[in-house]
Image (spheres, rainbow, N blue to C red):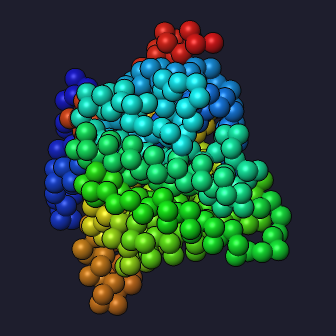
């Protein structure tokens, strides 16, 4: 009976959208193919499994909700459960601290694919790709707040080697899984207070990155990305890899630039930056997050900015050039629910964008008829999106509506509760 109601609602919605020139089935097909990369660190609070035991380096997790994944096997089990509740094409994004089976005495500058092979084998069972991040934090070899920009040559050398090893691991991910791995570089390097010299550390950072990126890899296996940030805890006044630094480096070295939704001033939006940056770069990486007054990494909600970001991607036909990843970690609520809520919201926004009758809006704009443009934009907001979303979930085998929540609650009772 429920399925028949969903089908009836979808039939009505399909007719309404057809009247404004939208083929609903084509819209669903187009957005279903767009990968969303789930961030593994939502499940373990970015503590990792390589023995560091604490999160440091300008970032923090708030909350102590029961059930944090303590091992790689637990994290994969949690991801298995969450992935089944999310429609569409998916990937998983790992951090280097998620290595497993690392022998005593082996440090991050000597990591190999062997410490991640279980992840590769697991990804194969899902038919999905993996992305990767070096972990330039939560480690005793952090020189205060510095890694690649440390004034100590030995410290820089250690982290340079870590970056090189991560690129090798990422390339092996791509080779084994048949899908390019994006290796994203973010370093927390910076000063808490105003520096006397704003140049020296940036020169060191450029030299370190150049050494890391010098080896060439097959682009079918590996893509490099550099992420910027406005500030972090303990480095509020000067971030070495700022927006201008990172964008300039990406442009000059022909790598991807990473836009994180929480890494800018609260009055800035990354939706407003995409079409500008993509005039000059072939591809960018998104870390979709939700900052509340600062880079607080709240669970992604279906708000105006999320919709605007996905509008930019879909309506400008950037789906092949913009790689979508999630980046937040909330330990105040059920961690699996965080994955499901955020991922489903991103997919909703993609579908809503694909159902936009943009041709009429752009035609009105091009002719100078801004009255019609505004009217059409506003009328689009009340088109019957929900029945299409419900049908899409049903057809994908994903839970419809909030029915996924009971599955999460049951998993919490049967699995997460036992981890305390």
Query: Where's residue 334, x and y in %?
Result: 56, 27
Query: Where is residue 169, by image quadrant?
Result: top left
Query: Where is residue 418, by image quadrant?
Result: top right
Quarter of the C terminus within the rendering:
top right
Residue 117 is at least partly visible in this image: yes
Horizontal arrangement in the rendering, residue 309 relative to residue 2 (left or right)? right
Query: Where's residue 374, x and y in %?
Result: 40, 76
Horizontal arrangement in the rendering, residue 228 relative to residue 326 (left or right)? right
**Which residue corresponds to the image point at 54% horizontal and 43% vertical from the top-left?**
109
**Which residue corresponds to the image point at 49% horizontal and 9% vertical from the top-left?**
414
Query: Where's residue 270, x and y in %?
Result: 51, 66
**Which residue corresponds to the image point at 64% horizontal and 45% vertical from the top-left?**
137
Q: 333 above or below 20?
A: above
Q: 399 above or below 242?
A: above
Query: Where's residue 381, x and y in %?
Result: 39, 60
**Which residue corresponds to the image point at 29% horizontal and 45% vertical from the top-left?**
174
């Amino acid at each position: 009976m429920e399925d028949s109601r969903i089908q009836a609602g979808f039939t009505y919605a399909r007719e309404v959208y057809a009247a404004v020139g939208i083929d609903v089935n084509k819209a669903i097909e187009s957005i279903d193919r767009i990968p969303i990369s789930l961030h593994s660190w939502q499940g373990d609070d970015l503590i990792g499994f390589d023995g560091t035991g604490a999160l440091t380096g300008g970032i923090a997790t708030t909350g102590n909700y029961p059930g944090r994944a303590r091992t790689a096997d637990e994290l994969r089990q949690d991801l298995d459960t969450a992935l089944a509740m999310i429609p569409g094409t998916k990937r998983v994004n790992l951090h280097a601290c998620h290595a497993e089976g690392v022998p005593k005495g082996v440090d991050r500058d000597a990591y190999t694919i062997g410490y991640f092979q279980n992840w590769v084998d697991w990804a194969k069972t899902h038919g999905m790709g993996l992305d990767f991040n070096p972990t330039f934090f939560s480690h005793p070899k952090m020189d205060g707040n510095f890694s690649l920009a440390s004034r100590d040559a030995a410290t820089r050398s250690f982290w340079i080697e870590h970056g090189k090893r991560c690129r090798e691991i990422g390339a092996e991910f791509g080779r084994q899984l048949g899908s390019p791995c994006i290796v994203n570089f973010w370093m927390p390097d910076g000063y808490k207070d105003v520096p006397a010299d704003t140049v020296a550390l940036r020169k060191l950072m450029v030299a370190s990155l150049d050494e890391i990126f010098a080896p060439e890899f097959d682009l079918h296996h590996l893509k490099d990305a550099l992420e910027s940030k406005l500030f972090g805890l303990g480095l509020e006044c000067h971030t070495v890899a700022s927006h201008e630094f990172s964008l300039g480096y990406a442009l000059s070295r022909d790598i991807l630039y990473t836009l994180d939704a929480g890494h800018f001033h609260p009055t800035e939006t990354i939706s407003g930056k995409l079409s500008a940056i993509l005039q000059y770069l072939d591809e960018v990486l998104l870390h979709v997050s939700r900052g509340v007054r600062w880079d607080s990494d709240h669970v992604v909600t279906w708000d105006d900015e999320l919709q605007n970001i996905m509008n930019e991607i879909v309506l400008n036909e950037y789906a092949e050039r913009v790689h979508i990843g999630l980046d937040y970690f909330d330990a105040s609520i059920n961690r699996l629910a965080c994955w499901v809520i955020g991922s489903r919201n991103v997919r909703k926004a993609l579908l809503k964008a694909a159902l936009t009758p943009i041709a009429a809006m752009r035609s009105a704009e091009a002719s100078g008829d801004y009255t019609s443009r505004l009217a059409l934009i506003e009328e689009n907001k009340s088109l019957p999106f929900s029945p299409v979303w419900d049908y899409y979930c049903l057809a994908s085998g994903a839970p419809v509506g909030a029915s996924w929540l009971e599955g999460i609650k049951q998993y919490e009772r049967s699995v997460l509760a036992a981890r305390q």
